[in-house]
Image (cartoon, rainbow, N blue to C red):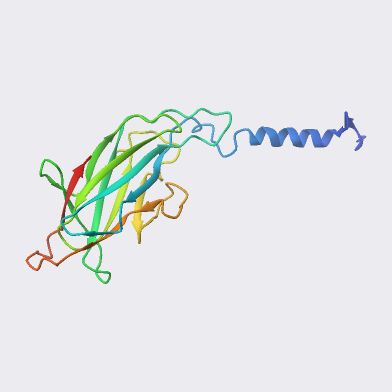
Amino acid sequence: MFYNRNIHFGAIPLWALFIGTGLLLAAGCSGCDEESIEKPDLLYEFANLESDEVDSGNPLVLRSSILNEEATCDLCTTLAAAVSQRGLSLEYRPDEDSPWEPAQLQDEDNNIVFVIVTPVDEIEPGFSVESTDGFIFTEPGIYRFKLVTDRDDVVDERVETNNDADSDSGTVKSDSATPVAGRFRLMVTVKGKQNTDRDPNEPVVVKYLSY
C-alpha cells in the first residue's frame, strides 16, 4: 500500500488537519459529561461571619451565598436549580484543648434544634441567592459552623458531593469553591465569663435570628 506523507490540504498537511479537527471537537465541551452537562450544580460561593470574635450576649451576623454554577462548556446549557433547602448547624468547645461537640440552636419559635433549615428559591444558572443569619451566644468558647445546600437532595446535580461548607480553623473543607483568602470565615471565639452552672453533659444553646 502506498502512503504519501506529503499530501497537503492547501498549505496544511492532511495529518495535521485531522489532529487539529479532533482537538477542536474535544475542546468544545471540555470537562462535560453527556449525561450531566445540563444539570445544575449548587455550591457555596462564600460564607463569612462578620467577625472572628464577639462578646457573649452580643449578636453576630453570618452572610453566605449559594451559587448555581454553570457547566464549563461553550456548547451546553445549564438548567435552573429547583426550589430546595439549606441547613445550618454548629459545634462548640470551651477551649482549644477540648473536643468539639454539637451545639443546639433556638429558633424564633423557641424550638431547640440541632439544624436550622430554611428554603432556597429557584436559582438560574450563573446566579446566586444570598442569606443573612444572626446568632446570640450566651456561653463563652469557640464555635464553628457547617452549612449545606440542597440538604434533602431534591436537586439533581452534576456534582452531588460539593454542597457542604465545613469549617476547620476558619477554612472551608469542601469542594464547594476554590479557596480564596477571606472568602470563607466560619469560626468564632465568644468572650465572656464561663457559666459554672451549665451542665457539661447538655449541649450549648445558641439563639438564632433570621434577617
Task: Give the camera-side residue of 16 and 187.
Answer: 187
Horizontal and vertical percent position of residue 148: 32, 45
The picture places residue 147, in percent across and down from the top left corner, at: 31, 47
Q: Give the side of residue 11 with respect to residue 165, left or right.
A: right
> Is 3 above or below relative to 102?
above
All told, the count of numbered labels is 0
Nearer to the camera, 27 or 52:
52
Q: Quadrant of the N terminus?
A: top right
**Between residues 56 and 98, which one lies in front from this camera angle?**
56
Q: Position of residue 13 (x, y in %)?
A: 86, 35
Q: Is residue 130 left or right of residue 29?
A: left
Q: Is residue 175 left or right of residue 131?
A: right
Asked if 204 appears above or below 125 in the picture, the reply is: below
Residue at image coords 44%, 31%: 125
Residue at the image point whose x is 47% and y is 49% from the top: 178
Quadrant of res 87: top left
Identity of the residue furthest to the left in this view? 197
Q: Does 37 sit left or right of 161 as displayed?
A: right
Residue at the image point whose x is 39% and y is 46% from the top: 46
Quarter holding residue 168: bottom left
**x then y, percent, for residue 95:** 24, 69
Which quarter of the figure is the C terminus placed in? top left
Q: Residue furthest bottom?
A: 97
Q: Could you tell me which residue is drawn at 38 percent across and 31 percent down? A: 123
